[in-house]
Each structure stands twice: as C-alpha cells, then as structure tokens.
Image: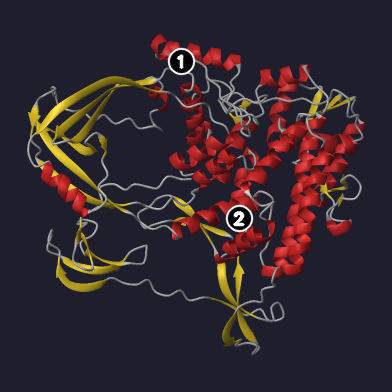
Amino acid sequence: MKNLVIVESPSKSKTIEKYLGKDFEVVSSKGHIRDLAIKGKDGLGVDVDDEFQATYSINTDKKDVVKDLKARAKKVDQVYLATDPDREGEAISWHLAQVLKLEIEDTNRVVFNEITKDAVLDAFNHPRSIDMGLVRSQETRRILDRIIGFKLSKLLKNKIKSKSAGRVQSVALKLIVDREKEIKAFIPVEYWTLDALFNKDGKEFEASLAKIDGKKAELKNAKDAQKAFDACSGAFEITNIKKQVRKKDPKLPFITSTLQQEASTKLGFSAKRTMTIAQKLYEGVELKSSTEGLITYMRTDSTRLSNVFIQSAHEKIETEFGKDYLGKYKVKNDDNSQDAHEGIRPTNLANTPEEVKDYLSPEQYKLYKMIYARALASLMASAKSNTVAITLSQNGYDFTANGTQLAFDGYLAVYGDYESSKDVVLPELEEKESITPKKLEQNQHFTEPPLRYSEARLIKEMEEQGIGRPSTYSMIIDTIQARGYVQLEKSTETSKTKVFFPTEQGMLTTDKLDQYFNDIINVKYTAQMETELDEIADGEMDNVAALGEFYNRFEPLVTHAYDNMEKMEPEKVGETCPECGNELVYRVGRFGKFISCSTFPECKYTRKIEQPEKEKPEPSGKMCPECGHELLKRKSRYGNYFLGCSNFPKCKHIENIEGEEKPKFKKRKATKKK
C-alpha cells in the first residue's frame, strides 16, 4: 500500500476509494480527533497569559481511531488529508498532521466540493499544503467559544441555575426574548378599509380604496370609514388603466441558510433534519451502477456555480424548453462568503430526481428534488406576467383593482412547485366608463405585532445580522432548546408553523446577560467577531491580538458579575416533601418548570406543576345576527373579552362587549420589523 487517504466520514470513504483505485486506502477520522484540553487556569485548556497557547488532548472516543491511523500511516509512502472543504475541515487536517507527525508544509491536503469521480481525481492531481490562515481562524473561534462558554456557563449556573451560555447561542436566544418582549408590549392600532365588489359582463372583481384627494388613504376609525362610505355610494368612473409586463427573476442557487429556510417552509423539515439529509446526499448514494454524491458540499455561503455546471445546465434548458428559457448567470455573495465554494447544486444533471427516486428515501427525494430544481431554475429566464392596474374614482376617492396573467412561465417551468403564480383576470374595461359597485363594505382591522421567530425566520435573521456561520445554525437552534431556554410550538390552533417561545429561564438568562454582559453578548459585537475571524483566515488580522483585545474586555465583566449578580435561591412552593418532610421548591429542567425537593439529590422527589384550565367560553344570552346561533363570551390572545359566534369557524361574526359590531377580518396588516 503506497497511499493513505483520511476523510472525516466513514460513509464516503468507500466511494472515494473506488474512484482512486488499488494504490489508495481511504479511512475515516470520524470527525475531530482532538479538542482543547480541560485543564490549566479555569479548565480552559488555554494559557491566557502566554499568547493564548492552546493545549489539546485526544478525544476519549477517538483514542482507538488515532491508534489505528498511526499504525496505517507508518506503512505507506504518502498520507493525504481529504477532510471537508471548510475551516472546520482544514482544522481537522491540521490536527491529523500534528498527531501523525506529518510536515505541515507538505502538499498532502486535497479538497473537493463534490464527491464525483472527476472532482476527486482532479483534487488529487492538485494537492496543496494546509492553509494555516483557516486553521488559525478556526482555532481562534474555538478558543473564544471555550472562554465565553466555560466562564459564562459557570457564572450563570452558580447564580441563576441556567445550564449554559455561549458566544452565538446567547445572542440567538436574545433575539427570541427581545421579540417576545416586543410582542407583549405591542398595542394594536385600529384601521379601516373600504372595499368594493363590481360586476362586468358576468365577471366579478374587487377594488379597494387607495387614495383620497391624491394622498394615500388612511381610515383610522369608524367615523373616517363612514365618511368615505357615504361619499362613494354612487357610480364610479374608470379614470386610469395601466398595463405593463412584469418580470419575476429566479432565485439564486441554495446556500446553507436558504436551503434550511426553504426546507422549513416548503417541506416542513427542521434545520437539523435538513442538514442530516443533505449530508447523506453529499457523501454518496448507492445508485444502479455506482455510489455517487448527488449534491455539492452543503455547508457554503457562496452562490457561485462552476462553468462546467453552467454549460451543462444551459444545454439541458435549451434542449428541454427552448432558447427562450435560457437565463443569465448571476452570483451575489456577501463580503464574508467563501467564494472557493459553490452554491448547493446537483453534481450531475443526468441524475434527475425521477431517475434516482428509487434509490432515495422519501425525505431525501424531496430535498434533492428541490435542490435540483433551484439550481437549474437559477439559470433560466425570468417569468413574465401581463398586469393591469385600474383606477376607479368618485368624489376624490380612488379605488384600485389589480389583475395579473402569467404570459411566460420561464424558470417557473422548473420551480413552479415551490412558488405559486395565481392569475387574477379582470373584465374588459375602458377609461371614462361608468360602473356601479354591487357591494361596498367598511372593514375594521387592527395592526398585528411582529411575528415570533420560526426556525426559518431565525436562521434568516442570524444570516442577515452576520451572527454565526452556515454550519452552526442548526446546532445553535438545538442547543437553546436542549437547555430549556425556548420551546418550539404552534403559535395558534390554526397555525401550521411552529415558532419559538422563550421559557422563564430563557427570559431570566437573557435579562442577566443584558445587565452584566451587554458589551459582549449583543448582535453587533458578535457580528464583528465573525468579521475578525474572516480577517484572520485571510491573514489580515493577528489572531493573538484579536484574542487579547476580547479577553481584556471580557474578564473584568466576569469579575464584576460575580461580585454583583444576586444569587437566586429556588422559589419555595409552600409545601413540604411527602417523602422526607423538607421544603419543596420550583426548579427548571429541559421540559420546563417542575416541583422538586429542596434537598435534591439526597431526596429525588419530583412532580409536575398542574396547569390551570384554559378559560372556557361563556354563554351570553345574545343571538348571532348572521346565523342565529348563540354568541359566546371569549377571551382574546391579548387578554380582552369579546362576543363571538358559537358556530365558529363556519360563522366568523364578532362583537365587542359593549355591543358595537366588529366585522370579520378580511386581512391583517403586520407591523414592519425594525
């Protein structure tokens, strides 16, 4: 045996070994083989007084793996390090080189973005040395996370019984807690709309009040609405007809964050599930005649596509759909994206979703189909719609009706399953034509608070704010749930989307971090850290200087918090333990608040907290004016009472307690996110 190749994952080692042939043995390190030791000052494994020198130790579960790798390395002429093509993978290669006593300057590092025969062979024809810029960046991130994680977690556990804190984890939690506070402080604002229903040649269409005397219409109360209603009781004149062609451009290929968002909203997958499925599609699937990686590397923040893929995609588009469907190649990367990577795409367009369906699980098929469609659609022409905007006027009040018809499907021919395009056809109308509404309605609405974060919305927010990196999003979401800081639940009985609700412990943790570590645990500083890590990777910043600046800022805050943060004793229930007679107290666990003996762990008595029954609707004695069923007194999500029909949801009639009718909501307007 002349060559040994070390990869991270066992599942791709056999595939790569087949590509390389008999002179290569491919084995797996099974991820990281070592980590920062838990020793030294504060158990950090980092000497903060000596330029943050790190001490590493072999992971307990990897000692046999390392022993085996050392034995194999002694028997070969060359060792190649083929770990994943990102900072984490580069660091794993460096750790392997250190443990196996390989020369760091050797050109023994091979990198490929997809596990296909051509890509793997090409990578082995162009090996390079380990990129120490990427290694220093990853090591700096790990040291930062260790210092913040260990010191803050120890503090919070001692003071408020919180399980952990982290550099990015705590900022993600803060986003959720801040949003919850914003929702609780939200005061609904009343507004009204005036909507008309017209009929022309048997075709009905709707129009809504848009302007009053040339200015945007604002009906703030019932009086404003009634005034507008009275002024619009006659016939309307068509004062303007505007026709135009609107283009809808295809979205760029998936990156990690957009894949997680789209898989959440379109397929109902969690971020963790999405990455697990994508990992398998990347590492390789057994097809009819070979094992092949179906997608490129799934941890990426670049939307770039290779020239080879673009050419093959254009050929497929022209052959299957025609020249009119060919689009232009577009790429839009953030300043911090790693452009050496590509966007997530199929490795071979010949492997259509239907061709490989029999070799995939249902979940793998759904995700692969979406990735395939998105990558191909990104290189297709824009969809085009014929739109018409009609203005209907009376006494200075302008109503608008909008129609749209798809004229050319473009990229929707491929991506139409994931983006809806609904036609709204208006009847033929002419300017100066007179038309009387069939119905004119005043509709009361209230502004709604901002939405709680779903997984998709939280990932999008973290990406936009520059918090964390693609590979960390699913782990962050898992951690804050596992620590009992948030719960992922449906927001209402009718909502299909689960959203994050902070627990009492999550709120307390954020409040204390806000009080004592606001300079460190915030969006701006965390994003700045990510920028500095990128600069370290590019050789533009010294890692020791960056760590020193952080530590000199952080350590005094820890000392101040230990001296001043009040230590919270468990809240007493006011009962004695039925098993030992000591006080019972409230505690917080992974699944929320519960009751426990104050002497735990000596006495292990626990019980659940009985939840108060949800307030039931009460009969009002009044009958619904719309359907004749009884009206019930109900409590809204905002805590106020109203009368609603007992025949809900078939009848949506509601009134306030004083008897003033509140017509059913036709649409709701959400406040803009700041």
Identified at 90% across, 24% down, the residue is 77
Residue at the farthest top position: 323
Question: Which residue is tagged 2?
Answer: 480
Q: Quadrant of the N terminus?
A: top right
Relative to the observer, which residue lies in front, 346 or 455?
A: 455
| Residue hosting label 1 | 327
Please give the name of the residue rendered at 61% of the width and 44% of the height, measured from the top-left corner. 473
Element under disc 1:
loop
Please give left or right for residue 85 compared with residue 56 in the image.
left
- Counting from the top left corner in percent of width and height, residue 216 is at 28, 38
Q: Earlier in the sequence, mark 2 or mark 1?
A: 1
**In the image shown, does 163 or 120 lie closer to the viewer?**
163
Q: Secondary structure at mark 2?
A: helix
Q: Where is residue 79 shown, x and y percent of the image?
A: 85, 28
- Horizontal side of 100 relative to 484 (left or right) equals right
Residue closest to the far bottom = 581
